[in-house]
Image: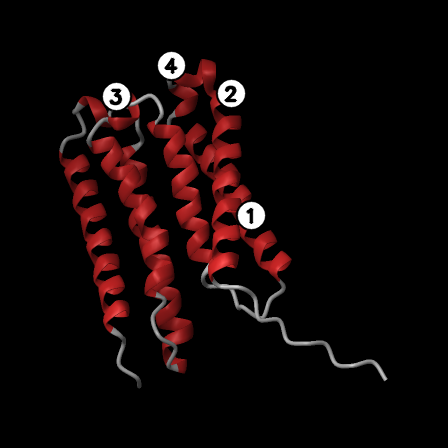
Amino acid sequence: MQRPSTTARVVLAADVAVKLATTALLVFAALHPDWQQFEGKAMAARAVAYPLGLLVLPVAWWVLRRPAGRPYPALADLLISIPFLVDTAGNALDLYDAVVWFDDACHLVNWALLMGGLAVSLPRWLHPWTRLGLTVGLGSATALLWEVGEFFAFLRTSPELATAYTDTLGDMVLGTTGSLLAGLLVLRLLPSDVPPRPATP
């Protein structure tokens, strides 16, 4: 098996560091549930869901791809992991309440990162429109699922419910926009290599 390059090792180290930092912040939040920045933020749900989310790609690779000798998709995993850290750190530093635009920025940038992780993983032999459609479609769907999860986790009993409709629409648009930007950027950096069609006799 070919040894990973220096760049690959750096990306993998960054990926591990992001996962450890996210876990540490989740533990910190669990130990300080009475702190103002953690109140009403469904940190208990995050403490369960986020570690599971961070394990999805490693477990899938271990079960499905490692036996075939495929290298670990460290870049994709790093891109997928960073949003978990950004959200957890944002809550720990009270940025969601202290910085007006932070929530909107997170929905745009985090979904760009998440779907960037998907986009760099898609086979390059797929047609560019197919790759872009998968990236934007899954980004829009996960943005919707996130908003549904937020509603059931804490919004329905929160004072923020009065403005939740407008905020939800804005968040979904930002998530979809971030997914579109990620898809376009990856297509620019990693263009499709579609096999030529056989000549028609």
Element type at marker 1?
A: helix
* Mark 4–mark 2 CB contact (< 8 Å): no
Element type at marker 3?
A: helix
As measured in the structure, the alpha-carbon distance from the residue carrying label 4 to the one carrying label 3 is 17 Å
Residue 84 location (% of width, % of height): 31, 44
For residue 154, side relative to residue 21 (left or right): right
Mark 1 surroundings within 10 Å by alpha-carbon count, few (fewer than 14), some (14 through 19), many (20 or more): many
Which of 149 and 125 lies nearest the eye of the viewer?
125
As measured in the structure, the alpha-carbon distance from the residue carrying label 2 to the one carrying label 1 is 21 Å
Seen in the picture, residue 35 relative to 111 is either above or below; the reply is above
Q: Give amino acid for label 2.
A: Thr
Which of 61 and 184 lies nearest the eye of the viewer?
184
Residue 100 location (% of width, % of height): 33, 21
Which of pointers 3 and 2 indicates the residue nearer the eye? 3
* Mark 3–mark 2 CB contact (< 8 Å): no
Quadrant where the C terminus sits is bottom right
Which of pointers 4 and 1 indicates the residue nearer the eye? 1
* Residue at x-position 36% and y-position 66%: 73
Please identify the quarter of the rendering in which residue 26 is found: top left
Label 3, on which residue? 98
Residue 167 location (% of width, % of height): 47, 23
Which of the marked residues, 3 or 2, is nearer the chain's N terminus? Answer: 3
Residue 12 location (% of width, % of height): 25, 64
Which of the marked residues, 4 or 1, is nearer the chain's N terminus? Answer: 1
Which of the marked residues, 1 or 3, is nearer the chain's N terminus? Answer: 3
Label 2, on which residue? 166
* Residue at x-position 19% and y-position 55%: 17
* Mark 4–mark 3 CB contact (< 8 Å): no
Please identify the quarter of the rendering in which residue 125 is found: bottom right
Element type at marker 4?
A: helix
* Mark 4–mark 1 CB contact (< 8 Å): no
Label 1, on which residue? 136
